[in-house]
Amino acid sequence: MTDLAIVLEAILFVAEEPVTAAELAEVTERPKNEIEASLLDLSDDLGAQRGVVLRNVGGGWRLYTHPDALGYLERFASTDRARRLSAAALETLAVVAYRQPVSRGQVTEIRGVDSEHSLKTLERRGIVLEIGRAPGPGQAVLYGTTDLFLEKLGVASLTDLPPLADHVPPAQIVETLELPMRPESSSND
């Protein structure tokens, strides 16, 4: 049987909000008083010489970074690698992932807005890279995803990406959504 402290720490590590002792008792199939005692022990263990602390807040338990590490965390958060991707960068990444090899112009055409900045951000982060040149006039740079992209997404290969069809609404819904954006027909016909 797995040590209860290991299980609790793992659950709290992935939790996005405080988790109650009752929830933890239900998940672990252990008595609530045993969970509470284990949480107090875990809180003592973590607070001693670790980078995270366990606090009882907002009606539940949650892991937080140790207050002594604040200065270092602020410096780390200001680095390029620590910043989250913007919605534009995520859209661009999705286009590259599903259409690769793809040029900047093709990404821009699909998204409907210039994607140069997003592509540069993704390149700088090592998530996409130049994988070749398009044949023909201009020989546009072609982009593709990297192994880091696969690692971050938790998949072994591009074939493990979910099919796009699962995320596209039926044609009648798309038509309804596009209707307000279509030019109105003239009433002088």
Image: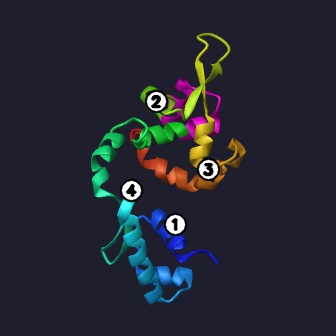
Q: Is residue 189 magenta?
A: no
> Which residue position is annotated with label 2?
115
Contact between marks 2 and 4 (CB within 8 A): the answer is no
Q: Is residue 106 magenta?
A: yes
> Which residue position is annotated with label 4?
51
Can you tell which of label 3 and label 1 is closer to the viewer?
Answer: 1
Please tell me whether mark 3 sits on a helix, a strand or a loop: loop
Residue 94 vs 166, above or below: the answer is: above
Measured as percent of width and height from the top left, residue 7 is found at 54, 72
Dot 3: few (<14), some (14–19), or many (≥20) neighbours within 10 Å?
A: few
Specify whether 60 is left or right of 151.
Answer: left
First of labels 2, 1 by sequence position:
1
Measured as percent of width and height from the top left, residue 55 is found at 33, 70
The alpha-carbon separation of the residues under discs 2 and 1 comes to 38 Å
The alpha-carbon separation of the residues under discs 3 and 1 comes to 18 Å
Image quarter of residue 136: top right
Dot 2: few (<14), some (14–19), or many (≥20) neighbours within 10 Å?
A: many
Amino acid type assigned to the residue bearing label 1 in the image: Ala
Question: In this view of the protein, can residue 123 be seen by the observer?
Answer: yes
First of labels 4, 1 by sequence position:
1
> Which residue position is annotated with label 3?
154
Q: Which mark is residue 10?
A: 1
Contact between marks 3 and 1 (CB within 8 A): the answer is no
**Along the line of sight, the residue nearer the viewer: 27 or 129:** 27
Residue at the image point whose x is 53% and y is 70% from the top: 6
Residue at the image point whose x is 39% and y is 38% from the top: 188
Please tell me whether mark 2 sits on a helix, a strand or a loop: loop
Image quarter of residue 130: top right
